[in-house]
Image (cartoon, rainbow, N blue to C red):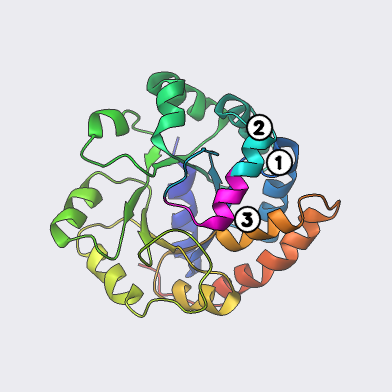
Amino acid sequence: MQNRIDEQFEALRRNGRAGFAAYITGGDPNLERTIDIAVGLAETGVDFLELGVPFSDPLADGIANQLGAQRALASGTTLPKLLYTISQIRCRIPIPIILYSYLNPIYQYGFEQFEQDALAVGIDGLLLLDLPPDEHSLSDRSSFLHRIRLIAPTTSEERIRTIAARASGFIYYVSREGVTGEQRTLSDSIGAQVEKIRRYSALPIAVGFGISNPEQAAQVAALADAVVVGSAIVRRIGELANESDIVSRLRELVHPMVEAVKSIKKSSR
């Protein structure tokens, strides 16, 4: 059985386009709404769903995602409850699901048990934000659950080589220094950095951090294999948390960005 991440990138290559990955915080504003939002995003044409495990000290996240984590924790979200929620999402959507987490929640859960349960509920990839790839005895247990690796603008070429060798599924390039958050302009070094990473890995490269509108999404789609949008979506979830039409209004935000990515035609490689 092939991992859904691999299948999706193969389909995207055949169709000559980049993918669109949407990030939301699991349990924001609550677990029931998380199911509705996930299904709504998939129906909008999102190619990958990224779910964040809410954590009390999200050091890599900007204010939008910090507030999303706070809302999720306040609603009673825990990792076991989130895994059950993901099993409900998996029954309704076929697209790959990637879990983003800090190390602590999974350490507390237990690595081996987490591996088993994550695969059982239909998770396809895992990104541990604060676990260095050098700690491969903890981070490379499963041969099926892809290990997504982060590379930053400040990562040296030697370090890129090390990270790329221990990545699977795809590589996530963080397009700017600092924490997550929407930006008015994108770094002009994205293209050069993506090409540098390609020298060390044949894996697809997704680019995130700061992308928040269709124009930016299209710009990145021309350079990378996937575009990741998170803070803009999470911020909007916070604004609409108590609204009955939250899903339809989120689709209004996301659909133009998905279409912008789809409009960029790429040569198959």
Q: Which quadrant is the C terminus positioned in? A: bottom left
Numbered label attached to residue 234? 3
Indicate the quadrant where residue 89 lies. Answer: top right
Q: Which quadrant is the N terminus positioned in? A: top left
| Position of residue 59 measured from the top left corner of the image (x, y, whole percent) | 42, 48
Estimate the spatial distance between the alpha carbons at disc 1 and disc 3, rounded to whole Å: 15 Å
Nearer the viewer's eye, disc 1 or disc 3? 3
User: In terms of depth relative to the viewer, which is nearer, 24 or 148?
Assistant: 24
Task: Tell me the residue that label 1 is attached to.
Answer: 35
Estimate the spatial distance between the alpha carbons at disc 3 and disc 2, rounded to whole Å: 18 Å
All told, the count of numbered labels is 3
Disc with the residue nearer the chain's start (1 vs 3): 1
Disc 1, disc 2: CB below 8 Å? yes
Indicate the quadrant where residue 81 lies. Answer: top right
Image side of residue 157 versus residue 40, left or right: left
Task: Tell me the residue that label 2 is attached to.
Answer: 85
Residue 71 higher or lower than 175, as above or below:
above
The amino acid type, in three-letter code, at marker 1 is: Ile
Label 3: which secondary element: helix
Q: Specify start and end residues of the magenta stretch as a single range.
A: 60-69
